Image: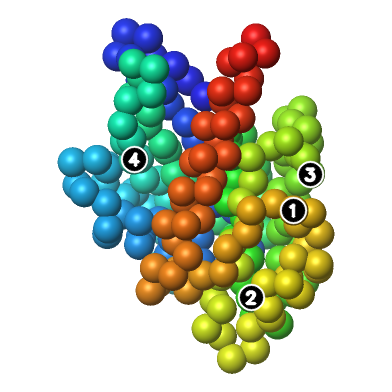
Amino acid sequence: MLINWKLRELNLKVVYYGPAFSGKTSNLIYIHSRVDPQRRSNLVSLKTQEDRTLYFDFLQLELGKINGLTPKIHLYSVPGQAIYESSRRLVLRGADGVVFVADSSEQRRFDNLDSWKRMHEHLTSFGIYTPRFPTVVQFNKQDSPDALSAEELSVELGVNGLPKFTSVAPEGTGVFETLKSIVGSVMSNLQRDLVTT
């Protein structure tokens, strides 16, 4: 969180994290296509020649004022490939909340678990107590022929009561529900922190 008192802006960072091709960028593309251009930035993507996210995707959204401040939500997605582990860690640093995007395909079980574990390792290395950190889980690609149910995926990842949503990101199913949930969690966490400081 960063407050610019001069501009009366509250800047919050939400990171979409998950394995390669799980749908992180698809979420941002759909959000960008449906939000009023007056309330969002351009979508910035740094990709390889194979059209895979190389460093991150970035999208900024503006919300209505809160306590005289204009919240600006900065949405990032991390590269899913293991060779970009240091980039994933760098993009995750300073996040106010995380959306973990799991690939529902049965063939991606290991990739989901590995990415989930690494995300928690990074957050812990930043001194973040993960059980209280705003996290929402999205089970994407529910239209895959071999898609596992949300219940199965929840047990495998051990999401322990975190908000979770099923989705088909390119069609928009579950995309805004996920976004609304993580923004709500981040704002609740922010209000709690402001009260205790």
Camera-side mark, 4 or 1: 1
* Residue in view at x 21 percent, y 49 percent: 36
Amino acid at circle 3: Glu
Query: Which label's residue is closer to the chain start, 4 or 3?
Result: 4
Measured as percent of width and height from the top left, residue 172 is found at: 39, 68
Query: Which label's residue is closer to the chain start, 4 or 2?
Result: 4
Measured as percent of width and height from the top left, residue 16 is found at: 54, 51
Q: Is residue 134 above or below residue 23?
A: above
Element type at marker 2? loop
Nearest the viewer among 153 and 105 is 153
Label 4 sits on residue: 61
Whether pointer 2 and pointer 3 mark residues with C-beta atoms closer than 8 Å, the reply is: no
Alpha carbon of mark 1 to alpha carbon of mark 3: how far? Answer: 20 Å
Camera-side mark, 1 or 3: 1
Amino acid at circle 1: Gly
* Residue in view at x 42 percent, y 38 percent: 74
Nearest the viewer among 116 and 185 is 185
Alpha carbon of mark 4 to alpha carbon of mark 3: how far? Answer: 28 Å
Tag of residue 121: 3
